[in-house]
Image (cartoon, helix red, strand yellow):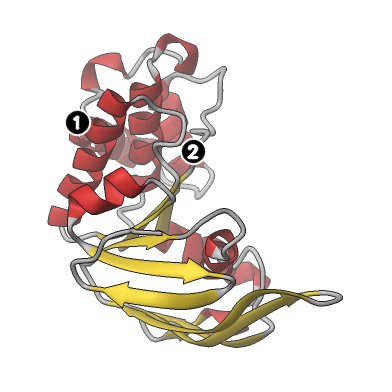
Amino acid sequence: MIRFKKLSKIFHPDTTALKDVSLHIKPKEFVSIVGQSGAGKSTLIKVLTAEIQPSKGEVIIGGWDITKIRQAEIPVLRRQIGTVYQDFRLLPKKTIFENVAFALEVCGIRNKRIKTVVPQVLKIVGLSEKSHRYPHQLSGGEAQRAAIARALVHRPKILLADEPTGNLDSFNTKDIIDLLLKINEFGTTVILVTHNKDIVNSLKKRVILIDNGKVISDQDHGRYVL
């Protein structure tokens, strides 16, 4: 599914964010990428979504070397990788239904298809009854569920969750992690980027630890002990 081959990223003049990172993430895996702030997690994610280009190495997604991606191909890549962030990034003047639908509208999807797909993903995240509310009318957990629905609307093969519980209390944190596990059970590869030790240790899934731009450990049923 995803292969990082001797991936390095140097920000000039002399800051090395990633150094010779080699990883293989299999289809349908649930992987936690952990490390302290500045360890290189964010840089790795930005390379994966083609937000930045590596200094050397390769990133292969389903046989596609995205380090050679053309600008016109980036939207195609990002439809295969649903992304969820800490700060939700919902459009405040659109309802939850409209927020999710907008991700399809910008790709030219027909209205008939939108009216079919959006209710389906809202049902998956448990927001069917709140589809006509606005972001400010939702709790933090509900807002993150809406963001996940938007990320799922293209039926991506990969769901990338970058600190998705950073703004949530412990109750809503568990709720969101349970939802990510449910999505993973549907067959979607889930990559969770976090520095929350409690979450990672409760999952008992694969854990990749990054420190100073290097992979320090990679365990199938790992723990975050730094």
Within-10-Å neighbours for mark 2: few <14, some 14–19, many 20+: some
| Quarter of the image with the N terminus in it | bottom left
Q: Is residue 76 shown to the viewer in this render?
A: no
Within-10-Å neighbours for mark 1: few <14, some 14–19, many 20+: few
Amino acid residing under circle 2: Gln
Residue designated by label 2: 86
Which numbered mark, 1 or 2, is in the foreground of this view?
A: 2
User: Which residue is at the far left?
Assistant: 185
> Between marks 1 and 2, how big is the CA–CA gap?
22 Å
Q: Earlier in the sequence, mark 1 or mark 2?
A: 2
Q: Residue at point 21% right, 27% down?
A: 126
| Image height of 209 relative to 58, above or below | above
- What is the x, y in percent for residue 125? 24, 33
- What is the x, y in percent for residue 182? 16, 46
| Image height of 119 relative to 20, above or below | above
Amino acid residing under circle 1: Lys
- What is the x, y in percent for residue 139? 38, 16
Q: Is residue 47 shown to the viewer in this render?
A: yes
Which picture quadrant has residue 133?
top left
Q: Are marks 1 and 2 in contact (CB under 8 Å)?
A: no
- 64 or 106, nearer to the observer: 64
User: Which residue is at the far top?
Assistant: 137
Q: Residue at point 54% right, 33% down?
A: 89
Residue designated by label 1: 123
Q: Is residue 42 left or right of residue 150?
A: right
Which picture quadrant has residue 121?
top left
Q: Which mark, residue 26?
A: none
| Quarter of the image with the C terminus in it | bottom left
User: Which residue is at the far right?
Assistant: 13
